[in-house]
Amino acid sequence: MTRPEIGVYLPQMGFSFEDVLHRARRCEELGIDSLWLYDHLYGPGMPDYPSLEAWTLATALLSRTERLRVGHMVLCNQFRHPVTLAKMATTLDQISGGRLSLGLGSGSIEDEHRRAGLPWGTFAERSEQLGETLEILRQAFDDGRIDFAGRHFAVSDMPVTPGPVQSPRPPIVVGGVGENFTLPLVARYADVWNVPTYALGQITEKIAALRAICDDVGRDPQSIVLSIEAVMALAPDEQSLPSVRSLAEKRFGGPGFGLHDTDLIGTPEVVAERLRGLVASGFGQIVLFTHDRCSDQTVQLLASEVIPRL
């Protein structure tokens, strides 16, 4: 069994830059593969709580690490024009020596769009716009030039140079499970498909749906890395498990987090066994919320006691 990429998801709400940088450097020192940020103008539901901007933060982290991959789960397509995003991505891939992962989605919080005066539209409209952005990015990465005319964007003979370090491109991650709009975009454009926490109870059905759509568009589903985003409550021993479980329930027990769908709650032996089940189901990338927001103890335990068991 090939070991999957193991990453941690660290929504930056309430953290200073020093807080996030410390966690990123610990992940790198311990051999964790990747760190993922969110892309919101403020913490969802908490507009007055401190929250660092996603792309600037990723740039700073990649500039201060050497091996760690950094990405977003996921960038909001409405926040950046696709040509600008293409230039940002190729530049950051150059700066980081090829360590950028490019997650992209159609947006999830209407309120922040309304407050910022950004168009929201229907899900169908946002998905169509996302599809055009993905086509523009693929042209930029693969061809070094963009020539595109769509409903939302028109780009004429736009060079994008220097191109990315990674070949053929920084991996494009698309998250979501909608069978009418999102999965067709995954089948056409994504290098990595991420199953979000809210869909963890539907994994089998959604994998089957993606494979069927890939067949329809002539894409080999094996060419898409399956990725999962899940909450992990990792306890060093049985004695500490009740308090770890309690904190996880408090922070991530609500609907949408899927805490009990993957049930990654327990000691390293238990969590590793459940992660092996995900790997056996075909997941090549696992991105973990930790119950305590990536404390030193939990990141150390993940690296020393869980990952070796995979």
Image (cartoon, helix red, strand yellow):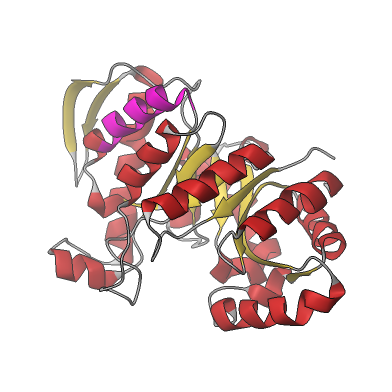
Q: Nearer the viewer, residue 228 or 33?
A: 33
Q: What's the residue at 78%, 76% (across, down)?
A: 241
Q: What's the residue at 54%, 56% (across, down)?
A: 9
Up-down: is 188 above or below 97?
below
Q: Position of residue 21 (x, y in %)?
A: 46, 46
Q: Is residue 174 visible?
A: no
Q: Position of residue 65 (x, y in %)?
A: 49, 33
Task: Report whether 276 appears left or right of 159.
Answer: right
Can you tell which quarter of the image residue 44 is in? bottom left
Task: Report whether 123 appears left or right of 302.
Answer: left
Q: Position of residue 248 (x, y in %)?
A: 63, 76
Which quadrant would the N terminus be assigned to in this image? top right
Task: Report whether 73 appears left or right of 292.
Answer: left
Can you tell which quarter of the image residue 254 is in? bottom right
Up-down: is 183 above or below 112?
above
Magenta-colored segment: predominant secondary structure: helix
Q: Nearer the viewer, residue 261 or 72?
A: 72
Task: Report whether 267 appears left or right of 59.
Answer: right
Q: What range is drawn magenta here?
A: 85-98
Q: What's the residue at 50%, 35% (across, down)?
A: 171
Q: Is residue 35 magenta?
A: no
